Amino acid sequence: MQTHNRTRGGSFRLAGSQRGAAAVEFAIICSLLFMIVFGIIEFSIILYDKAVLTNASREGARAGIVFEKDRNLTSVTARVNEAVARYAPNLINFGGTASISSNVVIGGGPTGPSATAGQPLTVSLAYTYNFLIFPDLSNLFGGSFSTDLTLQSQTVMRME
């Protein structure tokens, strides 16, 4: 049975101790709130990096298809890789320098790959994003979560 005591201010309080209840409730709600906020930040960074990777593949393909007088497979690949490398600093990576792996395929007809007008140029990029928060959070709750995610992008354009 609970008894009520009158305090000096005229208000009533329960006779049982309620100290610390608000701190416990705050700790529970605060940890959930922090997890949601940091999850939003983490996945926003992933979406940003995916957009940068998509733009890098598009710009690389655009650099590769423009007409050049003495165009060959090596010069096209070098121009594509140079354009992609210009975008690498735009990636958000807290673990060091961003590394984008690229694969450039110049389509070939019956004669094989050639850098002639009308041939398709395919630029495929891959980037490994390292999670910052979620692997630690999943370990805290007893689960397992991969520490990295491979983002990929591919662009196909015709040679001019």
Image (spheres, helix red, strand yellow):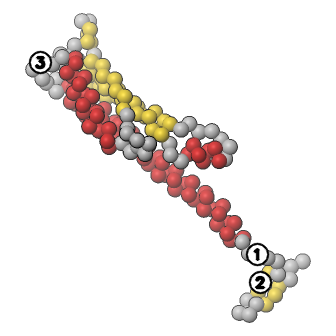
Mark 3–mark 2 contact, CB under 8 Å? no
Residue farthest to the front, as pictured: 96
First of labels 1, 2 by sequence position = 2
Q: Amino acid at mark 2?
A: Arg
Question: Quarter-wise, where is residue 110 in the image?
Answer: top left
Quadrant of image for the N terminus:
bottom right
Q: Amino acid at mark 1?
A: Gln
Determine the residue positioned at 56% across, 58% down. 34
* Of residues 42 and 78, the one drawn nearer to the viewer in this rendering: 78
Label at residue 70: 3
First of labels 3, 2 by sequence position = 2
Determine the residue positioned at 34% across, 23% down. 103
Give the structural element (helix, strand or loop) at label 1. Answer: loop
Tag 1 residue: 18
First of labels 1, 3 by sequence position = 1
Mark 1–mark 2 contact, CB under 8 Å? yes
* Of residues 58 and 72, the one drawn nearer to the viewer in this rendering: 72
